[in-house]
Image (cartoon, rainbow, N blue to C red):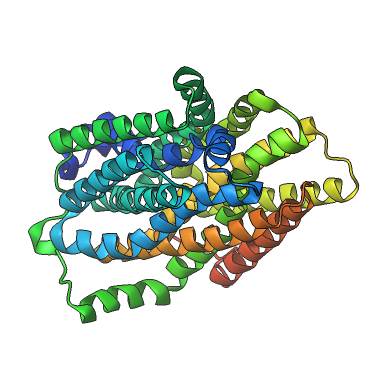
């Protein structure tokens, strides 16, 4: 955070909240998404048994349909928030999330559960898009990256504890539906906090029309801006490997490494690397800049992917080495995600909602396609994951090199990133 005092960072745009509460609220809103994803991991076998799902890979749909709703919903949340303001769209999305949780609790069939999961994902698309837009409304440049990093540090801590929390809920309630009760209660708490404390951050004078020409113009500006679309594609590629890891976590830790009920602990130990990355990024991004940190992290991501592919090909990937490599994967991802988002959003502050919407959709949907392709190829070994991890990372590296062509090693008198 460089030597900037936290009080100097308070923006009048989010008063009456001060800086600490603003970061916590943004993080708690964003946490709806990973909480709904990762709490489900220990429950997948229970869901499979309850609905008599014979193929283990099919249970990945409980996760992927959620992400499909999340990715698709982002297409409309941004333009709606640019027209009607951040607050009503955010509160509407959180309400959909709560209703979908009730539907999941009462789901009589696997198909109904998948519908509820898609609606949950759709609801959380508002929380992710609007949270990013609100931060962009209040901050720019490295300050935006630092705010996002602090929020991400809290947000990323959720996957560390979510599987263990889900396992605890299963032990207490003895059934998977109890997890959706907890998700519903958390959603209602976050909704109430937002209703009471979160102000509108988009002035009436800066709202945009929902006329098709204006919406399409915003989309066109987003997809034709080299920096924005480039970092969206790169983020989607690296996210694909992360999604595949989450989809396969239960099958890998239980099926390959035989950890049984201890698998949430291993998952938590690995995910802790992302929380550490969020803290370090928030501390140093003001000094080093978004590009230096994110490009270095992407290089580390590629090295980890290469080592994992090599060791798995040689049959030399025991649990301790897999956990170390996975922790490094999570760490490098944590050093990339906030910076890629800030770099993509930086040039498009005048259409922050639309840009955040399309950026989120692109990254999520690419990540889903890549993650599902890797996840569905699971054959009882880590080779398909290792190959997919390596290939998607090479694609991200190539994209970033194209985006930054002509800028790398070029001096700037007043760097902003």
Given the current orientation, which residue lies at the most extreme bottom position? Answer: 213
Q: Split into 4 quadrants, where in the image is the N terminus? A: top left
In the rendered image, residue 370, in percent from the top left (x then y), is placed at 60, 61
349 left or right of 175 in image: left
Farthest residue to the right: give it: 314
Q: Vertical placement of 310 versus 328: above or below?
A: below
Image height of 96 relative to 20, above or below: below
In front of the other: 290 or 165: 165
Residue 401, percent from left and from top: 61, 67
Residue 414 in view in this figure = no
Left or right of 227, for residue 130: left
Front one among 125 and 48:
48
Q: How many labels does the image show?
A: 0
Query: Going by the picture, which residue comes out furthest to the left?
Result: 204
Q: In which quarter of the image is residue 417?
A: bottom left
- Please indicate, yes or no, whether residue 51 appears anywhere in the rendered image: yes
Please report the residue visible at 79 percent of the width from the left and 47 percent of the height from the top: 381
* Residue 2: quarter of image: top left
- Where is 322 relative to 224, above or below? above
Q: Where is residue 191 in the image (x, y as percent from the top left)?
A: 22, 37
Whole-percent x, y for residue 305 in the image: 73, 51
Q: Residue drawn at (37%, 65%), measured in percent from left and top?
A: 358
Q: Identify the residue at horizontal 62%, vertical 53% (top origin).
A: 241
Left or right: where 241 falls relative to 325: left
């Amino acid at each position: 955070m460089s030597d900037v005092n936290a009080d100097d960072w308070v923006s009048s745009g989010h008063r009456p909240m001060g800086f600490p509460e603003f970061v916590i609220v943004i993080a708690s809103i964003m946490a709806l998404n990973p909480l709904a994803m990762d709490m489900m991991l220990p429950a997948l076998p229970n869901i499979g048994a309850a609905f008599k799902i014979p193929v283990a890979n099919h249970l990945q749909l409980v996760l992927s349909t959620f992400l499909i709703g999340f990715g698709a919903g982002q297409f409309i949340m941004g333009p709606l928030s640019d027209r009607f303001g951040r607050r009503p769209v955010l509160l509407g999305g959180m309400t959909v999330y709560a209703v979908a949780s009730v539907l999941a609790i009462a789901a009589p069939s696997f198909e109904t559960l998948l519908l509820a999961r898609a609606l949950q994902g759709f609801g959380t698309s508002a929380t992710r898009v609007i949270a990013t837009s609100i931060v962009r409304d209040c901050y720019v440049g490295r300050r935006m990256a630092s705010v996002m990093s602090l929020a991400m540090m809290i947000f990323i801590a959720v996957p560390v504890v979510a599987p263990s929390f889900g396992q605890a809920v299963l032990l207490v309630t003895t059934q998977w539906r109890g997890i959706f009760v907890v998700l519903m209660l958390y959603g209602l708490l976050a909704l109430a906090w937002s209703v009471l404390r979160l102000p509108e951050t988009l002035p009436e004078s800066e709202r945009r029309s929902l006329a098709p020409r204006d919406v399409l113009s915003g989309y066109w500006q987003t997809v034709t801006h080299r920096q924005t679309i480039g970092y969206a594609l790169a983020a989607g590629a690296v996210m694909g490997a992360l999604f595949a890891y989450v989809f396969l976590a239960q099958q890998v830790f239980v099926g390959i490494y035989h950890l049984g009920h201890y698998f949430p602990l291993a998952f938590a130990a690995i995910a802790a690397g992302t929380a550490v990355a969020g803290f370090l990024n928030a501390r140093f991004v003001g000094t080093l800049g978004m590009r230096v940190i994110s490009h270095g992290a992407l290089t580390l991501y590629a090295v980890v992917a290469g080592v994992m592919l090599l060791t798995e090909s040689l049959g030399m990937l025991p649990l301790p080495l897999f956990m170390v490599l996975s922790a490094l994967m999570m760490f490098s991802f944590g050093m990339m995600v906030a910076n890629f988002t800030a770099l993509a959003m930086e040039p498009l502050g005048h259409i922050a909602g639309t840009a955040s919407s399309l950026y989120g959709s692109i990254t999520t949907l690419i990540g889903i396609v890549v993650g599902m392709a890797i996840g569905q190829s699971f054959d009882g070994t880590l080779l398909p994951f290792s190959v997919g991890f390596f290939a998607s990372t090479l694609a991200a590296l190539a994209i970033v090199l194209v985006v930054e062509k002509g800028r790398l090693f070029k001096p700037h008198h007043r760097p902003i990133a």
